[in-house]
């Protein structure tokens, strides 16, 4: 029997759900036909993804000249989008790893979809790396493979090579973490399956899991150790991404605050995207009993915290630019705030620093419309943050004669829209075929944190 | 190999001698350790628990993964009646032989 939990702790499962009710709630979308809205969303996303194939094909076929880059601004939307997607991809493993170590049980309703989001976001990020190479057929060059180029080897001093290791490790470890958690839930779907095809596919997916006590014990151990390994991994990945900038000598990039500042920003944007997706998912799939207002509130608190950290980081950066006494550094920051890209800078400041402060109000934290709106604002703000860091630092370099402006072409915009299409196509397929809540794990808190357990039941109250 | 053939100073990380640019290897060392540890453990878990695609599951009860707990007991034929009544007394929902 599980322990008795304080009545002060929030209820995490509403509506007096039993074990079987949870199974029904989570399996319903898999076992029934998708509705009209799913099809509309799917067709729009898939069309955007097809557009991605066309514009990336055009870029590769014609060359990077079809982008708005020039010799001064060599990185712009491509790397902005890469960092944006990787940042979004930070919430999933944070929820399932760090919150597991901190024993935050509210992670159980949201970890599955957040991890799925992580994986799809990292796929989108990787797609930008490959497309910005211009020659994707040599994409294996950053790997330390035996080669025919004589004594040439990858340069381990380069943070771009660290990035290859960090992102691929993050992707594959998140993938197995996610999949291992999915196995018991696939087994539930398999054992309930009424059609032959469903039985066949979920038998393969569930790897023969039957949930013996020994298997569950090992499962718990593996989850715990994976969480322990993934925690430093989550923090390292965006630190390494930030070093792509921080180890350079470009004013505005060459900053030691970058790793923690990027990690906070990543968690900030990741949680915002989780909210955008879950507010819709819980409504469409009728999962309001498991993904409650309490979960939304908790995520909003994390957004408030990380948003404040990001705000402090912006101000620190500005202060240090002045305090360093380096005129290039000072100019880079004055130029950010008052130069030709002032609008991007102030959009970033408004969206990332001011708007999350609204979440001090408990009323707004538990208001779905406000949360949904702010989650989108936060992601817009985080996109502008990366754009500001990359483009404003580059467009006015050390030599004023090479100063220039950057604006994207339709091809770059198309690739960005296409990557959103890829992301939502994957997420919609996930919501259709995979259990969107870790139901087997969620059932472990039904005796301690559900609404009927809170009412007293046989536990008694104190 | 690169250090020997192409000595370079990149971003203040001189590669003229291994000990001088050792810190540059820390991120990759860390990531690679995590990669091997995580995958090694998960593969071990799958093999040890005989979890692989294509494994036929031994499903004893169709609701064992849903909301029921299954207890399998092996015993001699002559003890079956006693075992049954003992299980009934302790509140078994369903007994199958």
Image: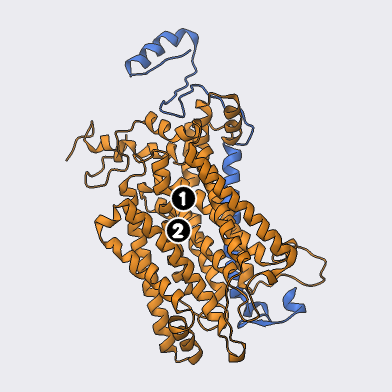
User: What color was chain B assigned in the picture?
Assistant: blue
Residue placed at 44% from the left, 89% from the top?
A: A324
Could you tell me which chain the residue with mark 2 belongs to?
A
Q: Nearer the viewer, residue A92 or A28?
A: A28
Its colouring scheme is by chain
Residue placed at 44% from the left, 35% from the top?
A: A26
Q: Nearer the viewer, residue A259 or A14?
A: A14
For mark 1, give the secondary structure. Answer: helix
Determine which of the numbered discs, if any, sits on residue B45 in the image. none
Q: Nearer the viewer, residue A178 or A219?
A: A178
Q: In the figure, residue A160 lies in which quadrant?
A: bottom right
| Badge 2 vs badge 1, beta-carbon distance below 8 Å | yes
**Up-down relation of residue B56 to residue A267 (above or below):** above
Q: Which residue, given by chain and number where applicable, does mark 2 sit on?
A: A270
Q: In the figure, residue A72 lies in which quadrant?
A: bottom right
Q: Is residue A339 left or right of residue A135?
A: left
Whole-percent x and y of residue A194?
53, 23
Could you tell me which chain the residue with mark 1 belongs to?
A
| Residue A38 seen by the camera | yes
Could you tell me which quadrant the N terminus of chain A lies in?
Answer: top left
Label 1 Cα crowd, 10 Å radius (few <14 / some 14-19 / many 20+): many
Give the chain ID for the orange colour.
Answer: A
Whole-percent x and y of residue A199?
58, 27
Determine which of the numbered discs, if any, sits on residue A114 in the image. 1
Could you tell me which quadrant the C terminus of chain A lies in?
Answer: top left
| Residue A139 seen by the camera | no
Q: Is residue A288 left or right of residue A126?
A: left
**Up-down relation of residue B2 to residue A271 (above or below):** below
């Amino acid at each position: 029997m599980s322990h008795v939990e304080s009545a002060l702790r929030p209820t995490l499962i509403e509506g007096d759900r039993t074990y079987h009710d949870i199974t029904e709630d989570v399996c319903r979308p898999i076992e029934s036909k998708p509705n009209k809205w799913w099809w509309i969303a799917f067709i729009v996303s898939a069309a955007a993804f097809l557009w991605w194939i066309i514009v990336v094909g055009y870029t590769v076929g014609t060359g990077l000249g079809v982008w708005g880059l020039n010799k001064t601004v060599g990185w712009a939307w491509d790397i902005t989008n890469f960092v944006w997607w990787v940042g979004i991809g930070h919430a999933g493993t944070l929820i399932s790893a760090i919150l597991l170590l901190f024993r935050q049980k509210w992670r159980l309703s949201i970890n599955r979809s957040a991890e799925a989001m992580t994986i799809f976001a990292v796929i989108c990020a990787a797609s930008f790396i490959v497309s910005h190479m211009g020659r994707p057929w040599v994409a294996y060059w950053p790997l330390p493979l035996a080669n025919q180029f004589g004594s040439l080897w990858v340069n381990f001093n380069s943070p771009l090579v660290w990035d290859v290791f960090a992102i691929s490790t993050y992707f594959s470890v998140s993938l197995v973490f996610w999949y291992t958690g999915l196995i018991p839930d696939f087994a539930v779907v398999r054992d309930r399956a009424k059609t032959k095809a469903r039985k066949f596919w979920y038998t393969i997916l569930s790897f023969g899991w039957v949930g013996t006590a020994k298997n569950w014990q090992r499962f718990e151990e593996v989850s715990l150790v994976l969480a322990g390994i993934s925690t430093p991994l989550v923090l390292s990945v965006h630190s390494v991404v930030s070093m792509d900038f921080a180890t350079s000598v470009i004013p505005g990039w060459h900053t030691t605050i970058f790793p923690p500042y990027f990690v906070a920003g990543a968690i900030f944007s990741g949680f915002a995207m989780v909210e955008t997706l879950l507010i819709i998912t819980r409504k469409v799939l009728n999962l309001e009993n498991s993904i409650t207002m309490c979960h939304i509130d908790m995520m909003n608190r994390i957004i408030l915290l990380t948003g404040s950290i990001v705000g402090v980081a912006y101000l620190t950066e500005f202060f240090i630019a002045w305090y360093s006494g380096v005129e290039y550094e000072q100019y880079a920051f004055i130029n950010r705030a008052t130069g030709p890209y002032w609008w991007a800078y102030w959009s970033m400041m408004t969206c990332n620093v001011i708007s999350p402060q609204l979440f001090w109000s408990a009323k707004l934290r538990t208001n779905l419309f406000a949360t949904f709106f702010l989650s989108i604002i936060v992601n817009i703000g985080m996109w502008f943050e990366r754009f500001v860091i990359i483009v404003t630092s580059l467009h006015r370099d050390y030599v004023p004669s090479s100063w220039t402006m950057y604006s994207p072409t339709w091809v770059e915009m198309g690739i960005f829209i296409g990557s959103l299409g890829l992301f939502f196509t994957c997420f919609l397929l996930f919501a259709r075929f995979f259990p969107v809540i870790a139901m087997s794990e969620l059932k472990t808190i039904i005796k301690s944190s559900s609404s009927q357990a809170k009412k007293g039941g046989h536990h008694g109250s104190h | 190999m690169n250090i020997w053939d192409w000595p370079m100073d990149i971003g203040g990380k001189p590669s003229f001698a291994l000990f001088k640019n050792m810190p540059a290897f820390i991120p990759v060392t860390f990531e690679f350790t995590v990669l091997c540890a995580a995958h090694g453990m998960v593969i071990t878990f799958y093999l040890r628990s005989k979890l692989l695609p294509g494994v036929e599951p031994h499903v004893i009860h169709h609701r064992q993964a849903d909301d029921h707990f299954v207890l399998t007991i092996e015993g001699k034929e002559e003890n079956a009646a006693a075992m049954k009544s003992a299980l009934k007394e302790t509140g078994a929902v369903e007994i199958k032989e």
